[in-house]
Image (cartoon, rainbow, N blue to C red):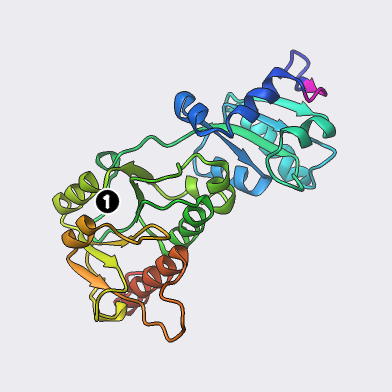
């Protein structure tokens, strides 16, 4: 904010700050700087409610319909130490990475947690995603994880990253509400074993239905890459291999759908015991 209490105004699409925002669309830049973009009022509001403090916040009064809630979010971000900028419509639309922007965009720190940085409760529920490529799938799994009360989501050997703006967008901001971590598969499996967490691997190559396993203790649901599924090493380390029954012609479900089905079987079993 300026000395008058009003944020500086950016009107040029060529402004260096907006160019720096555009650069964060590239993973190499995100990895180097440890930063990413959150676009959208609801996503940013959820992130801030979860304790995220933006490094900088950009808002466009001509685009936003958030009213007093939006103004309050701007004030709260400024009070927490974020640099706040008002942006003209043409400049904001150039900086935005999605169609139909709603006038809110922020720069935040990305998660750099490893498994060993996580703390699990006694009957933990963990979702492990091995080699998942598409940001939309990671984001969708985060939404399911948030809804199902998952205690942590771990990306093993991922092709994409938690800071990918499309992960943030497709997760509706839940990438900030669920603890996330990144580690190689071997390190993840070793850590889960140390935590006494049973590993349940999803695969079509088994006769065990996903409803035939007890999920009421500490458990990790493990799903694999969109094309090839789980690696042989991960399947070999699993305590249980389960399949989701399918009556159609296709031989697999979308990985985010599979994760949701499995997580809600856990929820179903735990609700019977009053643990959800």
Q: Where is 264 relative to 120, above or below?
A: below
Mark 1 neighbour density, 10 Å: few (under 14) some (14–19) many (20 or more): few
SS assignment for the magenta stretch, majority: loop
Residue positioned 47% across, 49% down in the render:
177
* Quadrant occupied by the N terminus: top right
Residue positioned 15% across, 56% down in the render:
196
Q: Where is 128 relative to 32, above or below?
A: below
Q: Nearer the viewer, residue 82 or 30?
A: 30
Residue 148 percent coordinates (x, y):
42, 64
Q: Where is 6 relative to 116, above or below?
A: above
- Choose top left, top right, bottom left or bottom right for residue 71: top right
| Residue matched to label 1 | 120
Q: Is residue 66 left or right of residue 203?
A: right
Residue 250 percent coordinates (x, y):
46, 77
Q: Is residue 261 left or right of residue 221?
A: right
The segment highlighted magenta reads 9-13
Residue 36 percent coordinates (x, y):
54, 34
Q: Nearer the viewer, residue 59 or 243?
A: 243
Q: Is residue 10 left or right of residue 226?
A: right
Residue positioned 27% across, 57% down in the render:
231
Residue 122 appears in the figure: no
Residue 11 is a magenta residue: yes
Residue 60 appears in the figure: yes
């Amino acid at each position: 904010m300026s000395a008058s209490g009003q944020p500086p105004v950016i009107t040029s699409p060529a402004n260096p700050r907006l160019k720096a925002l555009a650069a964060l669309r590239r993973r190499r830049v995100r990895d180097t700087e440890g930063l990413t973009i959150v676009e959208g009022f609801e996503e940013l509001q959820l992130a801030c409610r979860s304790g995220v403090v933006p490094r900088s916040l950009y808002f466009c009064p001509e685009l936003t319909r958030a009213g007093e809630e939006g103004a309050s979010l701007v004030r709260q971000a400024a009070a927490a130490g974020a640099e706040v900028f008002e942006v003209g419509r043409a400049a904001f639309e150039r900086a935005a990475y999605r169609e139909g922007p709603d006038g809110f965009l922020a720069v935040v720190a990305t998660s750099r947690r490893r498994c060993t940085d996580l703390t699990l409760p006694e009957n933990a529920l963990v979702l492990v995603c091995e080699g998942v490529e598409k940001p939309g799938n990671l984001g969708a799994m985060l939404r399911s994880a948030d809804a199902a009360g998952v205690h942590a989501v771990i990306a093993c050997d991922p092709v994409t990253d938690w800071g990918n703006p499309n992960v943030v967008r497709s997760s509706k901001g839940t990438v900030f509400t669920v603890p996330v971590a990144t580690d190689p598969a071997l390190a993840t499996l070793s850590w889960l074993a140390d935590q006494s967490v049973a590993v349940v691997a999803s695969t079509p190559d088994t006769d065990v239905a996903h409803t035939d396993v007890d999920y009421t203790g500490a458990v990790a649901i493990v799903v694999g890459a969109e094309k090839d599924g789980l690696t042989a090493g991960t399947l070999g380390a699993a305590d249980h291999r389960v399949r989701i029954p399918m009556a159609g012609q296709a031989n697999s479900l979308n990985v985010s759908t599979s994760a949701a089905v499995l997580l809600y079987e856990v929820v179903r079993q735990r609700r019977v015991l009053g643990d959800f």
